Image (cartoon, helix red, strand yellow):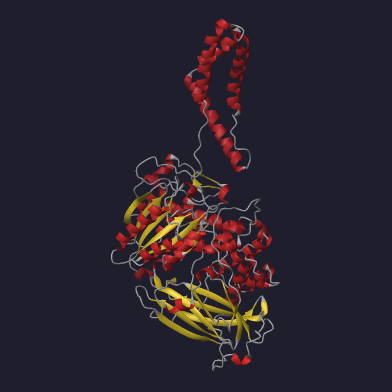
């Protein structure tokens, strides 16, 4: 008994600083050990270090022995219990484990300035100054967070020198793109662009992305992510020309579907059929199309007719539009409102952190006189940044870096406030709201028609809307498509920083400089030469025949340098590939007699110049021998379209396989300076593995 009491008294008399030092050591070792286990994929529960155990074990054993003995001595029970409780409180408080901040938290600055330490992209590396960047396996190197900055490193961020701040942020973005390229997840275009802009001291060669091994990328997942919502329309059916000779649709320059499909395949599962919009897969790529002769006519339509790869009995009609490229330096200053979803669902590393990185990339490539405002929505909407010129980089960066996720979604309030700010910024000109969200966007308007009318009314005031999607699991693509299609804007899906570079830097001119609005395509097929036809894709862009000449009907927009591709599969009269029988009561004499037997069809395009209310018309015949487009470009577009049809399990593809699509794409890959086509070829292999 006396030995136990002596040990207890010695522990109580121990110097507080010694206890504190021991507790700190134990907490630090436990934290480091826990971090190692997290990165090795094992149990994340912290265990005391060996040093801490040597301190705690004798004391705990003494308490246990003492308690056993004194329970038979009532006169000691009260005093000993009080001592035991007091000692437990002291040890608990002094030895409390160090609470490590989540990887997504922003490290605050230690000195002057409002700019928080930037979140950067995940890399497994050591910087030259010794600050480690911690790898976040949950996003597979798509996004990173930066470890706390040492005091010596705070100087650059704390300094009011904007150039120093920009340099650091650009360096982090450069490292991210380099890592993504090394992994083979992205193409070299973003890497080349960043290096050419002087944003990184050294960047990898684009050749590193052209690896041929599908096994290096394919990662099997036990469960397919659920919760994403797509409002897919049924696949376009085969049409009988004699019964329905006219096909009408609005053009589409969105790319969201391709990025989503790529993200799914890289995660090892096959995307749902509704997520595959073939026109967005095809239009993701640049093609070499004939350019317009002058800027008075905003685009040049081209047509080529060739054999269909998956069906030798049919023909493929390739319709292309090439918009002229405007001089971006001569454009009017842009008025942009970033409407950012900061709800709790955005806390994942590939959502809000990647979103902030993406806008930083865009910011670095805007003109000094462009103006930015930031509105957020979560539990409530708020103006985070009043309209500010891009030249004030420090202020804008501070607002972006201080964003954090939390709360529920209040989309309606945020959307209304963003439009209000944009209208004030537009004045007599125009403005654009850029909505960035994971799609869990409760806009507060339940009726889809009411939502369309709300967005359309704002569009008529000169305020347009573009949509950027992030993350998966609650991605509401259906709502985002409604918003973008009715807001005179584009919808894109950003899954990597390199994709942000493509959408917000490489293609930003197409977003900020529209060259034609309400662009519609109508093809009248000749029943004397074409028995059947089907439009490949554009299901969600279908228009009624009478909508073509109605200038009040909204359609798609084309921006500076945009290309648009549409493909029809047609069956000629007399071909063995005709799928439908002649009607009993339809005589051959009833077939139309025309002087156009040398034509397959007639192409018409309508468009409005920016600001105009009356459309203009372009017309051109489609003949069997017409070849305006390089065969290599037609072949690659066909490979992409065929791949999309395979993902949708379209029975019209017959025995055509992923191997056939991959062989065709490889043969038509061409120069492929930026590696996009090489990436696509690899995705076909992943899709084959994910069947």
The residue closer to the viewer here, 577 or 446, is 446
User: Relative to 60, is 419 on the left or the right?
Assistant: left
How many marks the image carries: the answer is 0
For image coordinates 50% across by 21% down, the residue present is 89
The residue closer to the viewer here, 454 or 669, is 454
User: Relative to 242, is 342 on the left or the right?
Assistant: left
Residue 195 appears in the picture as rendered? no
Location of the C terminus (image quadrant): bottom right
User: Relative to 664, is 120 on the left or the right?
Assistant: left
- Residue 145 rendering spot, x and y as whole percentages: 50, 47
User: Within the image, what quadrant is residue 281 found in?
Assistant: bottom right
Vertical position of residue 666 compared to residue 454: above or below:
below
- Residue 461 rendering spot, x and y as whole percentages: 33, 66
Q: Quick one: which residue is furthest to the right in this view? A: 655
The residue closer to the viewer here, 548 or 285, is 548
- Residue 409 rendering spot, x and y as whole percentages: 44, 49
Residue 303 appears in the picture as rendered? yes
Q: Quick one: which residue is furthest to the front in this view? A: 585
- Residue 503 rendering spot, x and y as whole percentages: 47, 63
Location of the N terminus (image quadrant): top right
Vertical position of residue 400 compared to residue 602: above or below:
above
The residue closer to the viewer here, 623 or 94, is 623
Vertical position of residue 69 compared to residue 94: above or below:
above
């Amino acid at each position: 008994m006396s030995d136990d009491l002596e040990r207890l008294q010695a522990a109580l008399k121990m110097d507080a600083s010694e206890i504190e030092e021991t507790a700190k050591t134990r907490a630090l070792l436990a934290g480091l050990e826990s971090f190692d286990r997290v990165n090795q994929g094992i149990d994340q529960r912290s265990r005391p270090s060996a040093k801490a155990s040597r301190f705690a074990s004798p004391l705990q054993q003494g308490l246990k022995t003492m308690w056993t003995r004194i329970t038979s001595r009532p006169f000691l029970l009260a005093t000993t219990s009080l001592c035991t409780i007091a000692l437990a409180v002291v040890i608990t408080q002094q030895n409390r484990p160090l609470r490590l901040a989540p990887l997504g938290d922003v490290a605050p600055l230690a000195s002057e300035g409002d700019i928080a330490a930037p979140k950067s992209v995940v890399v497994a590396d050591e910087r030259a100054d010794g600050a480690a960047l911690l790898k976040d396996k949950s996003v597979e190197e798509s996004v990173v967070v930066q470890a706390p900055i040492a005091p010596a490193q705070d100087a650059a961020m704390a300094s009011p020198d904007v150039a120093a701040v920009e340099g650091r942020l650009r360096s982090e973005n450069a490292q991210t793109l380099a890592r993504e390229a090394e992994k083979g997840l992205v193409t070299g275009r973003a890497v080349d662009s960043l290096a050419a802009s002087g944003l990184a001291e050294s960047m990898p060669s684009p050749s590193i992305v052209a690896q041929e091994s599908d096994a290096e990328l394919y990662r099997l997942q036990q469960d397919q992510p659920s919760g994403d919502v797509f409002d897919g329309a049924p696949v376009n059916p085969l049409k009988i020309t004699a019964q329905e000779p006219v096909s009408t649709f609005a053009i589409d320059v969105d790319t969201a579907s391709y990025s989503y499909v790529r993200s799914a395949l890289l995660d090892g599962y096959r995307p749902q059929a509704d997520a595959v919009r073939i026109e967005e897969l095809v239009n993701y790529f640049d093609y070499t199309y004939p350019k317009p002769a002058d800027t008075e006519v905003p685009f040049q339509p081209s047509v080529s007719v060739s054999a269909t790869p998956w069906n030798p009995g049919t023909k493929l009609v390739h319709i292309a539009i090439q918009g002229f490229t405007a001089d971006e330096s001569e454009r009017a200053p842009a008025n942009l409102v970033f409407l950012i979803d900061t709800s709790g669902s955005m806390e994942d590393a590939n959502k809000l952190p990647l979103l902030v990185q993406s806008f930083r990339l865009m910011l670095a490539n805007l003109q000094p006189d462009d103006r930015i405002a930031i509105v957020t929505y979560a539990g409530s909407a708020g103006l985070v940044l009043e309209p500010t010129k891009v030249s004030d980089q420090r202020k804008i960066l501070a607002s972006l870096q201080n964003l954090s996720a939390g709360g529920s979604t209040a989309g309606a309030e945020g959307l209304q406030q963003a439009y209000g700010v944009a209208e004030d910024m537009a004045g007599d000109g125009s403005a654009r709201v850029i909505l960035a969200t994971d799609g869990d966007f409760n806009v507060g308007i339940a009726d889809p028609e009411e939502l369309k009318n709300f967005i359309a009314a704002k569009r008529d005031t000169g305020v347009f809307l573009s949509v950027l999607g992030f993350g998966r699991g609650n991605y509401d693509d259906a709502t985002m498509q409604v918003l973008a299609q009715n807001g005179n804007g584009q919808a894109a899906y950003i899954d990597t920083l390199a994709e942000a570079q493509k959408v917000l830097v490489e293609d930003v001119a197409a977003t900020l400089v529209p060259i034609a609005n309400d662009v519609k395509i109508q093809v009248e097929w000749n029943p004397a030469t074409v028995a059947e036809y089907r439009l490949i894709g554009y299901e969600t862009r279908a228009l009624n025949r009478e909508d073509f000449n109605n200038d009040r009907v909204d359609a798609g927009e084309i921006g500076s340098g945009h290309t648009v591709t549409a493909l029809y599969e047609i069956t000629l009269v007399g071909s063995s590939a005709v799928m439908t029988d002649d009607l009993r009561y339809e005589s051959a004499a009833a077939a139309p007699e025309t002087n156009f037997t040398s034509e397959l069809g007639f192409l018409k395009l309508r468009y409005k110049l920016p600001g105009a209310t009356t459309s203009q018309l372009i017309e051109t015949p489609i003949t069997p021998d017409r070849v305006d487009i390089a065969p290599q470009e037609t072949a690659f577009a066909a490979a992409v379209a065929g791949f999309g049809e395979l993902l949708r399990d379209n029975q019209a593809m017959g025995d055509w396989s992923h191997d056939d699509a991959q062989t065709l794409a490889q043969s038509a890959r061409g120069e492929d300076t930026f590696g996009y086509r090489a990436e696509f070829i690899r995705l076909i292999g992943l899709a084959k593995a994910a069947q």
